[in-house]
Image (tube, rainbow, N blue to C red):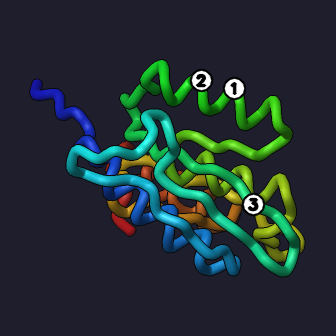
Amino acid sequence: MRYFRPRRVPEKDVVVKVDGLVAKVGFRAIHFSQSRESNQTPGIPDRLYFHRLTGLAFWYEGKADDGTQMWEQQLFERDAVACRQFYVKGNFRDVFDFLLAHELWKLPMGVEAKMVAGDPWKEKLETAEQYAKRIQRAKDRRRGVKA
């Protein structure tokens, strides 16, 4: 039997996906990440997002699923949190949870947010009903029932 590891999503692609998510809610992004050597202060996160209507701003450090922070990034996070600034590190799910917690992403009544597991390139949101149907289809496939 062959085992397949899920494909690793590069940090750069994670940040681009998050940019799209927060833009839908009305955030403006200030880009700090650079792929080349620069004189920029070490530890500065990839993005600073502003939402002018709500007055909310947060720092974002994009990380792939297996990514870890450098000590400079950890220091920056501690300083930002100590100064009562929001700091989010991680991937699409972490930012989405932040938006839900601050009520910037509203879901219709009776709809639960669940992330579709599997291919991280096709990560999307689904309703509780869609989730139940997907699970039922998977069970039927295992039992050999045709759809």
Give the camera-side residue of 56 and 138: 56
Which circle marks residue 78 in the picture? Answer: 1
- Dot 3 or dot 1, earlier in sequence: 3
Residue at (31, 53) in percent of width and height = 34
What is the number of the mark on residue 110? none
Q: Amino acid at mark 2?
A: Leu
Identify the residue at horizontal 17%, vertical 28% (top origin).
3
Determine crowd level at label 2: few under 14, some 14-19, many 20+ residues with C-alpha closer than 10 A: few
Q: Residue at x 56, y 70 (%)?
A: 29
Contact? badges 2 and 1 (CB < 8 Å): yes
* Mark 3 or mark 2: whose residue is earlier in sequence: 3
Q: Secondary structure at mark 2?
A: helix
Between the C-alphas of marks 3 and 2, the distance is 19 Å
Q: Is residue 4 above or below residue 38?
A: above
What is the CA distance from the residue labelled 2 to the residue labelled 1?
5 Å
Question: Disc 3 on helix, strand or loop?
Answer: strand
User: Where 41 sits versus 132, above or below?
Assistant: above
Q: Residues within 10 Å of mark 3 (few under 14, many from 20)?
A: some
Res. 57 mark: 3
